[in-house]
Amino acid sequence: MSTEDPDSGTSGLPPVFLERQTYRRRRLMDAARLLPLLGVGLFAIPLLWPMSGNSSLTEPVKTSGAAIYLFIAWAGLIAASAWMGKKTQGWIRGDQPPPDAGRAQDHG
Amino acid sequence: MATLNLLILVCLAYVILLFGVAFIADRLAATGRSTWLRSPLVYTLSLSIYCTAWTFYGAVGYAARSGLEYLTIYLGPTLVMIGWWWGLRKLVRIGRSQRVTSIADLISSRYGKSNLLAVCVTILAVIGVTPYIALQLQSITLSFGVFVDSDAMGEYGEHGVVFWVAIGLAVFAILFGTRNLDANERHHGVVTAVALEAVVKLVALLAVGIFVVWGIAGGVQETLVRIDTSRIGEWQVDGGRWMMITFLSAAAFVCLPRMFQVMVVENDDERHLRTAAWAFPLYLLLISLFVVPIAAVGLDLMDQTDNPDMFVLTVPLSQGREGLAVLAFLGGFSSATSMVIVAAMAMSTMVSNHIVMPIWLSSRSGSASFSGDVRHVILLARRISIAAIMALGYFYYRLSGGGTALASIGLISFAGISQILPALVGGLFWRGATRTGALAGLTVGFALWVYTSLLPGMGTGVLSASVMMHGPLGLEWLRPHALFGIEGMDPIMHTVLWSLSLNTAAFCLVSLYTFPSPLERLQGAQFVNVFDHSTSPRGWTGSVAQAEDLMIMSQRILGAHEAQELFHREAELQGAWGGHLPEPTPQFLDRLERALSGTVGAATSHAMIGQIVGGSSVSVEDLLAVADESAQLLEYSSQLEAKSAELARTARQLREANEKLTQISLQKDAFLSQVSHELRTPMTSIRAFSEILRDAESLTPEEKTRYATIIHDEALRLTRLLNDLLDLSVLESGQVSLNMRGGTLSDVLDRAVSPALAGVDRPLVVHRRKSNEAIALYSDLDRLAQVFINLIANAQKYCDATDPELVITVHQMGGQLLVDFVDNGSGIPPEAQSLVFEKFARVSAEKAGGAGLGLAICREIMQRLGGDVTYLGGVSGGAFRVTLPLANEMAAQ
């Protein structure tokens, strides 16, 4: 997958070593990419729970508990995503056109 | 009790409100004062058309039937949105840079602008969405039914209601979606209305949920207890279905035409995705938060016979909360209408762009320049296709009987629309994906979906029970719900598993096997590497920089004066004063593009302005068009160059010819005057003496004889002159025939010396060395002798020594024979040496015996014979050298 690096402003080969801040930004982008995988994992966990019917040894999990787990996991993902959006908000502004510029060409 | 009429009135009022909102939003967008319309919030809310009546009514029904499985429908899109960095970002960037208008357009554009593929995707989308439309019809009909059932006064006929609902939604979608044509297929008004509806449905569902939790159950704890004691109180999901439906909803979220419309086509700013990445999952979470409580309480309160799909309405109604029920009804109505509007809009765009317009344009090729005409046709095509889509939905509802759970209808639709996914994902991430591969995958997947899911869903009217039980023609392994003999699978899992896996397999295998066209490969590279190619403009900050850059570019193309005038005019039009640059408004950019296109061609100017204004990148088509234009220009200029070179050559030739003509004319004049002069002298004496003979009466016979002799001599001289002239002209014109034969030099000299000296009073002494002269010649010996005679006679005539002598020496040098004639006179003065071979050139006038043509003739003869005659300077006396090729050299020629 091709990636766009918001920090390598000039053309040419990307540098091998980065500033500390740039390095952190890249790792934040990695985290943003990993977030859906975490979500898949979280949402797959309930499949491991004992269910009614197929296992008589353990009590099946209550729907309320399952719902609370799922909604908390869901909310956690949303919060993480929002936090990352906020962290990355500052530096995306530098490398993208302001909304006015975008609008001008939409009609032009 | 709310009557049917009251409900209809509420609906109408609500629709009018939506129209008003859309109208105002369009007006604001047109005047450019609608910054909040382009906010991430509106974008997020417009995405919520994902939540249709299926969500609003069907989710509760789904939960009442299958517990928490309904969440998968929202977890899939949540994962897609949270993972926007992987896929959606690329999709939106491509959508913007390639200016795509629909998902069919995107697919066709990726695979080399294949219209066949676009048609396939369009058909798949129309058929795939048909059950979804039917779902909306069913939910609205059911919700009307809920109110009418509880209203004893109402006369209720289900089919009649469905029919009128379908008509109403069609009219609504036509009025909303096809009011105007926008080149970018963006509809600010519709998006704003959809955002409003998103708020209404969220508020309505939350209100019902809050009422249920705190109004009926009496708190959160009590609600949780109720849930656990209800029929769905225990965690029980099918793991396969859980994963499969999550995946399916994620796929459908990306592939649904209406989602593509709001997510990609209506996207104003890529950065909105950043906000929507968490805000839209939050919306989904909120809307599904109270679904389980409502379902649990509904199961508790209502009869077993009540349709759980309608709990959102029936629970408040059973508690006597009619106001809340009407609000919930409006929420459901919003869900259905917003879905129908956007879906119909997206589909009608696809149908008109990819099916109707190609047919219409090809049916009347050449006359498509009437834009008004085309607009009319497009609008008509869209209206008709909206009506047709609604009709399809209506018939699906009638065929399926209207009794199915909403969620299961929706899943059929999802499975159908997901068949686009392999072609879409492959197109975005795999450069090797080809058009044929995409076609093969779509066809296989679509066919399998129709056979295993769509047709069985329509009930026994389409596929008979025996086909369902034993397969077509008794082929058991072709049973629609047990393909290849694998039985016992959940129908929707069965469909998705087979159709998507075989779809992907066909797509990959055919892609690997086939070879893409050049345009396909270019587009593939553009799509897959969109972040490398598309403009990510850095440094274009604000409109001032743009205007300046536009100015610089225009000056280069139009010339400084013209460009400044154009910009000045535009600035005045915009009301700017005092040398300000005009704002890059769309109108200005339009005009500028037209002005530039006059110089560099339309495609080039579009690409240039696009580059400066930013945002959309230059597509391959643009580049091809630019290359085309440049090639035309180059060809034209090279033609011009060739022509001008030819003209220059012709002019030079003309000039040379003119000079030559002038020279020849001068030569001719000089020659004529010399000839006439030479002729006049003897003629004068002939005339004078003949007059004397005629007029003098007393002449002695001696005198007569003398005069007659003079006349005779002069006549001879004239004859000689004329002979010489004739000889010269024959030689010069190259028409002389040479009589080539062998001989020796000494013979020729012998033959020349005696006639040259015959009849002379005081002959000069000729010194020769005969031993040197025994050289074989192959030449025109008579002509050669003539040359020698002339040279010897000249020496005889002009040698001014008291004892004139002539030395004739012969030697050979470099295959040439040199014969020198050197006398002991004073020779020719240096200033006259260059003239002696000219016609009528005479060294001294007093010794003018001949016409002065002798040496000229000699030279002509020698040149004809392959040699030359030159005057030797630097020798004491007059000296001429005759150059001759040797006999063997001549023979070799």
Image (spheres, rainbow, N blue to C red):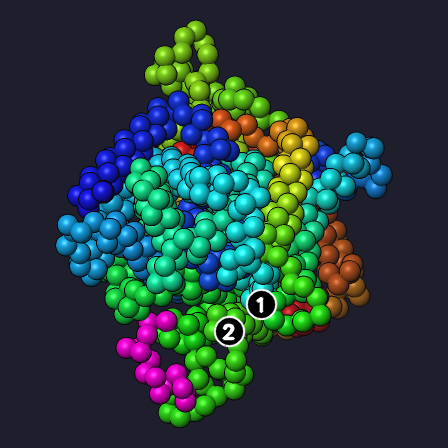
User: Which image quadrant is residue B675 in?
Assistant: top left
Question: If the image is split into quadrants, where does the C terminus of chain B sit?
Answer: bottom right
Chain letter for the residue marked with disc 2 in the picture = B
Assess whether mark 1 and mark 2 are in contact (beta carbons under 8 angstroms). yes
Placement of the N terminus of chain B among the 4 image quadrants: top left
Q: Is B852 part of what is drawn in magenta?
A: no
Q: Nearer the viewer, mark 2 or mark 1?
A: 1
Other-residue count near label 1 (Cα within 10 Å), few / some / many at <14 / 14–19 / ≥20: few
Horizontal placement of B339 versus B222: left or right? left
Asked if one can make out residue A36 in the rendered structure from this viewpoint, the answer is: no
Q: Secondary structure at mark 2?
A: loop
The structure residue drawn at horizontal position 45% and vertical position 51%, both measured from the top left corner, is B297
Secondary structure of the residue carrying numbered label 1 = loop
Residue on which disc 2 sits: B490
Q: Quadrant of residue B867?
A: bottom right
Q: Identify whether B242 is placed above or below B294.
A: below
Magenta extent: B457-471
Q: CA distance from mark 2 to mark 1?
A: 10 Å
Residue A70 is situated, as x and y percent measured from the top left of the image, at 62, 51
